[in-house]
Amino acid sequence: MVEEATLVEIDNSVIELSKKYLPHMACSYDNPKVKVVLQDGFKFLKDCASKEESQKYGVIITDSSDPEGPAENFFTENYYQLLYDALTPDGVATSMASENIWLNIKKLAHLRKAASQVFPVARVSNCTIPTYTSGQIAILCCAKNSHVDVSTPIRTVTESKEGILFKYYNHQIHSASFVLPTWAKNIIYQ
């Protein structure tokens, strides 16, 4: 159960524009469990790393822009170390890799390798997103504990509940997203 969700955003206009143009998606800002922090994500993570375990995060999701240009620091071993240090012992981190197996697999392999220098578990999930080039995006899923299998949902609900709660997601889709073609797996995990 989610006790609190912290959104860290450096630019308040992103939040204001999402409220204005995406009101059906921005309604979560009004949820009492949501805490919005207007701050640079790197500074936030550095501060979090020095906190007690009880103030660290079980899950950290990074949704940044592409790994080239201004956001490239979100795709380095240093950033993965900040994520690692801000997590609880069984914590997981996900990061949009902004690459996919069809367009830049060497970059994707490089990102996974950088994450694996820090995390004992660093897996690539290949997700269907129709609006992205080639219709797919890769997500890097990392776990601080080597015994965590990110390809298996930690919590599950019955299939009938899945049909009520979700339009797309289910436990089979979750697990299947980690299955890569042999040629891609050989490059990414070499």
Image (spheres, rainbow, N blue to C red):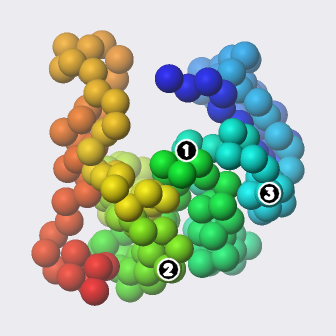
* Residue 143, above or below 81: above
Q: Nearer the viewer, residue 121 or 7?
A: 121
CA–CA distance between discs 1 and 2? 19 Å
Disc 2 to disc 3: CB gap under 8 Å: no
Total marks placed: 3
Tell me the number on the disc at residue 59.
Answer: 1
CA–CA distance between discs 2 and 3? 21 Å
What residue is shown with label 2? 117
As shown in the figure, which amino acid type bears the numbered disc 3? Ser
Q: Nearer the viewer, mark 2 or mark 3?
A: 3
Residue at the spot 73% in from the left edge and 73% down from the top edge: 70
As shown in the figure, which amino acid type bears the numbered disc 2? Gln
Residue at the spot 49% in from the left edge and 59% down from the top edge: 144
Tell me the number on the disc at residue 50.
Answer: 3
Residue at the spot 55% in from the left edge and 44% down from the top edge: 59
Locate the C terminus and report the quarter of the image it occupies: bottom left
Q: Secondary structure at mark 1?
A: strand
Q: Secondary structure at mark 3?
A: loop
Residue 153 placement (x, y as % from top left): 31, 39
